[in-house]
Image (tube, helix red, strand yellow):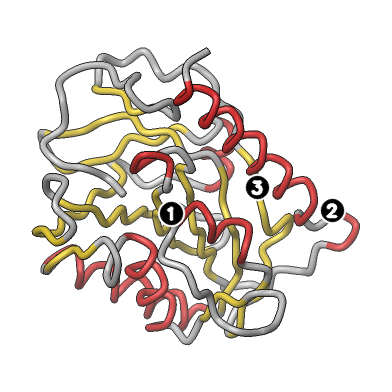
Amino acid sequence: MSLGAVDTYLTRRHGRRVQREQAVPERDWAPVPVGSYTLLVLFNLMAAFDEGHAILAVGPSGGDLMTYSYYRRGNALKAPALMACLREPETFSALRRASGWIVHGNPGNWWNEHVDCAVALAAPSEAGRAVADYAEGVKAAPGTYDLVTHNCLAFVEEALAAGGVRLTTVSGAGLRTFVPKDAFEAVTGATGATPFRAWKYWFDDVPAPDDGLRTIGDDPGTERGDAPAAHRG
């Protein structure tokens, strides 16, 4: 087994352990108020050379979600930003049935992408709409991506903040990392929102949909189809 394959295996195993340890058991699930929004932070833990990638998903609880994947053109530390969204909105239940496989991109350029896990929140409707409005604004004008100061995780935190939501750590402080992979473990709560049901979810790595689209899986170097014009992470 190559060193890269070992790193990927260890990353996946660690992420699964975090989910098992921190997920809320069903008996302790808090009721979800009628009219709430679901806010998800989806993670591909092995993207960006094993540093991970974070994707925002937002929509009415029980209804369709839209995803916002903020990434860069090319591999430079600072580069023009791009935004990929779901080809068609889908529910959280559908995402779980697909074991984390989503169809992302923009019209004329769609690809299959796998996310390993999610942090899930329930927020008041006005907060959820504010998060969605912010994400749509960045989609319209993505600006500049900076790997250290304004990467995918920074975008997610900014969008949540637009709805008054802040991800917190065990001490109650906000996240202090720009590494998406680390955030999945480090975040233990939120202000302005409450855990949605299990709070931390895991999606098993199952085969990609056989639909002829470019496929971006968990393992670096295993992409199928035409090479992408940009780098996610």
**Amino acid under label 1?**
Leu
Residue 48 vs 197, above or below: the answer is above
Label 2 or label 1, whichever comes before in sequence order: 2
143 to the left or right of 96: left
Foreground tag (3 vs 1): 3
Residue corresponding to mark 2: 26
User: Is disc 1 placed on a helix, strand or loop?
Assistant: loop
Q: For the view shown, which residue lies furthest in the front direction?
A: 3
Q: Nearer the viewer, residue 127 or 105?
A: 105
Residue occupying image coordinates x 37% and y 47% = 89
Residue 65 - label: 1
Measuring from the top left, give residue 90's x and y in whole percent.
43, 44
User: Is disc 3 placed on a helix, strand or loop?
Assistant: strand
Residue 142 vs 200, above or below: the answer is below
Foreground tag (2 vs 3): 3
**Amino acid under label 3?**
Tyr
32 to the left or right of 83: right
Residue corresponding to mark 3: 201
Label 3 or label 1, whichever comes before in sequence order: 1
Label 2 – label 1 distance at C-alpha: 22 Å
Measuring from the top left, give residue 204's x and y in whole percent.
61, 29
Measuring from the top left, give residue 172's x and y in whole percent.
67, 84
Label 2, residues with CA under 10 Å away: few <14, some 14-19, many ≥20: few
